Image: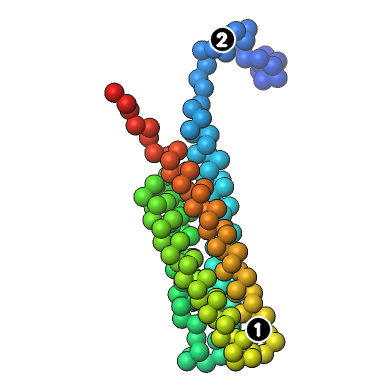
Amino acid sequence: MQQRKTTAAGRPSGTDGSDFSYRMVVDSRYTKVTKGRSRLRLLILVQATIYLIGLSCAFMTSTKNDERNTLGIASAATGLLFSFIADFGCRRSRVNLLRLYTAASTVVMVLSVFSAVRSRLTMEERNSSGTAAKLELLGFVSAQLGAVVQILAIIVTGSLVNNMSPPTKTE
């Protein structure tokens, strides 16, 4: 028992520290993948939150079935779905799912921004009430913030996919 405490506190027994050159070194690509995954998972969480805000704003601002913002609801729901796909691809190191996420979420974000701008313009034309105007403004701001987060997600996903892909051999 006494021996176990001394080895746990200091250097392992049987080495004097001169064997450092023979120890394994982790390739920098793997550390970049780990950092990229943590960054992408944070961006996916932020993006999913933005989609939830957009979805709730689209539902709460619609007063009648005729005035329902179907484009806003569909784009936010689809974006939320692709956020789950991206999280799965990030956890399982699926490059194809991450590429699908990048392409699809970009299209969804463009549609979401278009829907928010259209909703904001029609709100000014019909002079909405105070609560509806605040909700539409919140949806507009969240769509703009989502576009910025989408640009960051494209950059991080591209870097992550490049580091996940095996290096090509040149012969």
The Cα–Cα distance between marks 1 and 2, rounded to whole angstroms, is 68 Å
Badge 1 marks a residue whose secondary structure is: helix
* Residue 47 position by quadrant: bottom right
Name the quarter where the N terminus is drawn. Answer: top right
Residue 84 seen by the camera: yes
Name the quarter where the C terminus is drawn. Answer: top left
Out of 169 and 21, give the one closest to the viewer.
Answer: 169
**Outermost residue to the left:** 171
Q: Position of residue 29 (x, y in %)?
A: 48, 33
Q: Is the residue marked by circle 1 packed among few (<14), some (14-19), or many (20+) residues within 10 Å?
A: some
Out of 109 and 94, give the one closest to the viewer.
Answer: 109
Q: Is residue 103 left or right of residue 156?
A: left
Q: Amino acid at mark 1?
A: Ala
> Residue at 43% of width from left, 44% of height from top?
161
Q: Which residue is mark 2?
A: 19
Q: Amino acid at mark 2?
A: Asp
Residue 44 seen by the camera: no
Comes first in the chain, label 1 or label 2: 2
> Residue at 51% of width from left, 49% of height from top?
155
Q: Position of residue 30 (x, y in %)?
A: 49, 34
